[in-house]
């Protein structure tokens, strides 16, 4: 019985190994997603995907800036409410934009404005979209995507 | 800066669709098609949700 389970596990491992060969870790596969996180779109630009990189940069930066202009809130690290913690994780995805916003002390959030809540969501989503962009830059770097 | 709920939703849909299109498809033509599809779904979904809320209220 145990031998059968071992065989099944080995067979399953063999199949997955055949399907997805291990990708070699290259300098670009580390630098592209890291740079893409820090500067939106830069992970694509460094790999000479100019059009995609510029469009991603425009989209993420525009959403973040619009969110700040709508007086949205930029979350700091916190251990309070679960939504506040998730907000921080989302905001952190914006990388350099988040760091600059925190350093300049912008993104206090105006609770008396309805649009400020939209702004908060814009900022969080720009961070999440930037994470998707950084993962895409990684896929390009390892040759999974043209 | 003040935006209406609808204009905020349309701008949100526009930028999110660009990122989805670029990251979720490999070919340029497919990227444009998928991005456009996402944009339409976002906007139609917003309008539909608005009508659902209106029906719930009345």
Image (spheres, rainbow, N blue to C red):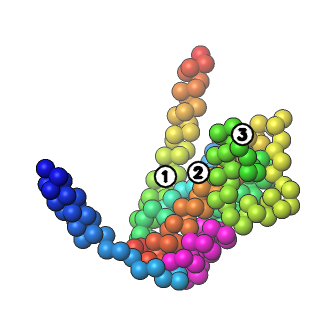
Please determine if labels 2 and 1 lie on a single subunit.
yes
The residue identified by callout 3 is: A80
Residue drawn 51% across the image and 59% down it: B20
Residue drawn 44% across the image and 77% down it: A142
Q: Are marks 2 and 1 in contact (CB under 8 Å)?
A: yes
Where's residue A37, x and y in %? Answer: 62, 67
Mark whose residue sits in front, 3 or 2:
3
**To which chain does the residue with label 2 belong?**
B
Is A19 within the magenta?
no
**To which chain does the residue with label 3 belong?**
A
Q: CA distance from mark 2 to mark 1?
A: 8 Å
Where's residue B31, x and y in %? Answer: 45, 65
Quadrant of the rendered image containing residue A114:
top right
Name the side, left or right, on which A127 lies relative to A104: left
Vertically, is A27 above or below A66? Answer: below
Is A53 within the magenta?
yes
> In this view of the protein, which residue sits in the foreground, B47 or A50?
A50
Q: Tell me the magenta residue range.
A: A29-56
Quadrant of the rendered image containing residue A31:
bottom right
- Residue B13 disc label: 2
Where's residue A81, x and y in %? Answer: 69, 37
Mark whose residue sits in front, 3 or 1:
3
The residue identified by callout 1 is: B38
Q: Circle 3: is it few (<14), some (14-19), or many (20+) Cα within 10 Å? A: few
Q: Circle 2: is it few (<14), some (14-19), or many (20+) Cα within 10 Å? A: many
Vertically, is A26 above or below A144? Answer: below
């Amino acid at each position: 019985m145990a031998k059968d389970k071992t065989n099944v596990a080995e067979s399953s491992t063999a199949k997955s190994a055949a399907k997805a060969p291990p990708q070699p870790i290259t300098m670009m596969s580390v630098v592209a997603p890291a740079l893409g996180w820090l500067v939106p779109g830069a992970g694509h630009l460094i790999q000479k995907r100019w059009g995609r990189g510029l469009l991603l940069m425009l989209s993420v930066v525009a959403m973040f800036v619009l969110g700040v202009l709508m007086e949205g809130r930029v979350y700091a690290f916190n251990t309070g409410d679960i939504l506040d913690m998730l907000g921080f994780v989302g905001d952190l995805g914006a990388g350099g934009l988040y760091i600059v916003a925190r350093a300049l002390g912008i993104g206090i959030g105006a609770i008396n404005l309805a649009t400020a809540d939209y702004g908060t969501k814009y900022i969080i989503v720009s961070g999440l979209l930037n994470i998707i962009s950084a993962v895409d830059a990684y896929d390009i770097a390892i040759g999974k995507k043209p | 800066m003040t935006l209406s709920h609808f204009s905020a939703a349309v701008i949100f849909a526009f930028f999110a669709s660009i990122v989805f299109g670029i990251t979720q498809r490999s070919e340029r033509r497919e990227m444009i098609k998928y991005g456009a599809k996402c944009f339409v779904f976002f906007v139609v979904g917003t309008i539909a949700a608005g009508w659902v809320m209106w029906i719930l209220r009345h």
